[in-house]
Image: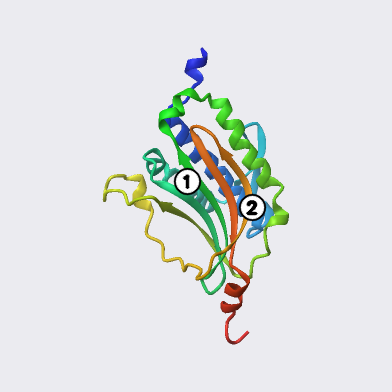
Amino acid sequence: MNPKDENQSGGDVARTLVEFLEVAITMIVSLKGLYPSAAFERRRYMNMVVQRARHPELRDYIHSAASGLLPFVEKGLVERVAVVFFSEDNVSVERFIFKLMINTSCAASVEEGQLEFALKSFLIKLSVSKSLVKPLPQSCRWEVTAYLRSLPEVGSSKDGEQWIPTDTKQWQKPPVITPVKSLNSEPLCLQLYLEHASFSERHNLVKPNQ
């Protein structure tokens, strides 16, 4: 295989990014400790050990959420992908945000190994980020949310039909942001950061009977 064959197209970059997001989302859920450790198993990805969900429903949800983003990522519609954790009263308490931008015109000049090396650094950072996250309240839940730059045409993607508009409550004040990792190069710019409600926001969200 010559060097040119190792280069990626815009679609290849999008697929590599979506595969990475599936692994990263699984690592985040494992990191938060919502499920027992036996719910995950060790796998190798990009020549490193990562977590993979063992339960079929959990594994399928994460896979379908990530793979369903592919047509939107290829068209440059996805601005952010968030893993959002909610309290029992359905208020978000923590968000892991992936902010992304793909320049498809530069994708052909980037070798697959270079892109994988850059994305691998995010997974390494996630694996040692337990000190950055806060304990979650009991009976919490989580979901994957995508923020689009513009709405796609209705029926333009069969994969996208599994995505529905969100009813997630938004914080009224700017969140506290903790940067985790960033990549600023061609063809991919990617940022990973944590969002928590500000102190005043948390104070306002306390239930009256508590």
Residue labelled with disc 2: 30
Residue 1 visible? The answer is no
Q: Is residue 168 above or below residue 14?
A: below
Q: As rendered, which of 185 and 152 lies closer to the eye?
A: 185
Residue found at the very far top of the displayed protein: 2
- x and y percent of residue 140 in the render? 58, 67
Q: Is residue 37 above or below residue 110?
A: below
**Residue 180 got which mark?**
none
Residue found at the very far bottom of the displayed protein: 209
Within 10 Å of the Cα at label 1, are there few (<14), some (14-19), or many (20+) other Cα atoms?
many
Residue 101 visible? The answer is yes
Secondary element at image label 2? helix
Q: As rendered, which of 118 and 37 lies closer to the eye?
A: 118
- x and y percent of residue 162 in the render? 37, 52
Residue 149 left/right relative to 131: left
Type of the residue with mark 1: Ala
**Residue 66 got which mark?**
1
Type of the residue with mark 2: Ser
Instruction: Look at 64% across and 49% down and name the residue there.
Output: 180
Residue 103 left/right relative to 55: left
Instruction: Look at 62% across and 41% down and name the residue there.
Output: 122
Secondary element at image label 1? helix
- x and y percent of residue 208 in the render? 58, 86
The alpha-carbon separation of the residues under discs 1 and 2 comes to 16 Å
